[in-house]
Amino acid sequence: AQTVTQSQPEMSVQEAETVTLSCTYDTSESDYYLFWYKQPPSRQMILVIRQEAYKQQNATENRFSVNFQKAAKSFSLKISDSQLGDAAMYFCAYRSVKSSGDKLTFGTGTRLAVRP
Amino acid sequence: DTGVSQDPRHKITKRGQNVTFRCDPISEHNRLYWYRQTLGQGPEFLTYFQNEAQLEKSRLLSDRFSAERPKGSFSTLEIQRTEQGDSAMYLCASSLGSGGHQETQYFGPGTRLLVL
């Protein structure tokens, strides 16, 4: 079974600065998807960014980018020019290509605080 | 498109009572997922439907839990004889499953259950 580990329960960043959230995962599969989801306080979870394992190029979405190291099974999220609205729980998630249903396996999350 | 909706948003019940939650997915989405999220944890997969067929159930889904999606549209999750350990946020997500690489799970706001 796949596992996802987020070793940073809480992180803090100054507004306009850059922060990196860590995620490692364990799998025996070669093809899969990785995601970062954001869950703001009392609001629903939204997708931040997605990475397909077969792609070597790191995904980027505006201020959000990932550092995908397949051999190391590492998938970190970098948030540049942090904004107050970035404060939220961030979850790293894994999805197998082979299994049916595309269920997501989540890490325990990192709570990000943004200091004004 | 109003997104994924869930009802109720909050439910307080006494131990031993039955509760039922409803999820309305995005209208054209054929896949629907239920997850459970406890405090300080990431969401955990419970079950998954493709149209009206329940295709996968987690071992977390005890006999007291039942989910349905009778017409392939909305879904209900029922918990019978609730226990205090059932207290959690129950999240619903939907996606357009086509086997392609662009599927994204869109989450609802969740139903927070408290069992006294």
Image (tube, coloured by chain):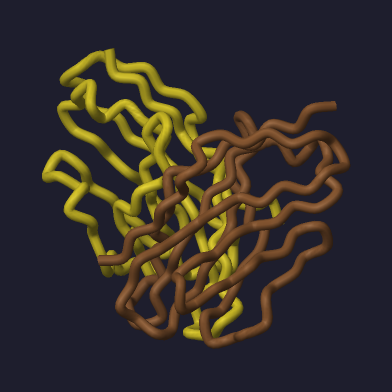
Chain colours: A brown, B yellow
Looking at this rendering, what residue extends furthest in the front direction? A72
- Camera-side residue: A72 or B18? A72
B72 or A114, which is in the foreground?
A114
Residue B39: x and y, percent? 41, 29
Give the position of the N terminus of chain B as an image quadrant: bottom right
Q: Outermost residue toward the left?
A: B63
Is residue A39 in view from this perspective? yes
To which quarter of the image does residue A4 belong? bottom left
Q: Residue at x 41, y 46 (%)?
A: B43
Taking the spot 38% from the left edge, 51% from the top edge, the residue there is B34
Where residue A58 appears, as percent x and y from the top left, is: 67, 75
Location of residue B104 by image quarter: bottom right
Q: Quadrant of the C terminus of chain B?
A: top left
- Which residue occupies 35% across, 66% down? A26
Q: Is residue A107 above or below residue A93?
A: above
Measured from the top left, where is residue B87 in percent x and y?
Answer: 32, 26
Q: Quadrant of residue B33?
A: bottom left
Whether residue A16 sits left or right of residue B95 in the image: it is right
Q: Is residue A44 visible?
A: no
Q: Report x, y in % for residue B50.
A: 38, 70
Total numbered labels placed on residues in the image? 0
Q: Tell me what residue is drawn at x 50 percent, y 56 percent.
A: A23
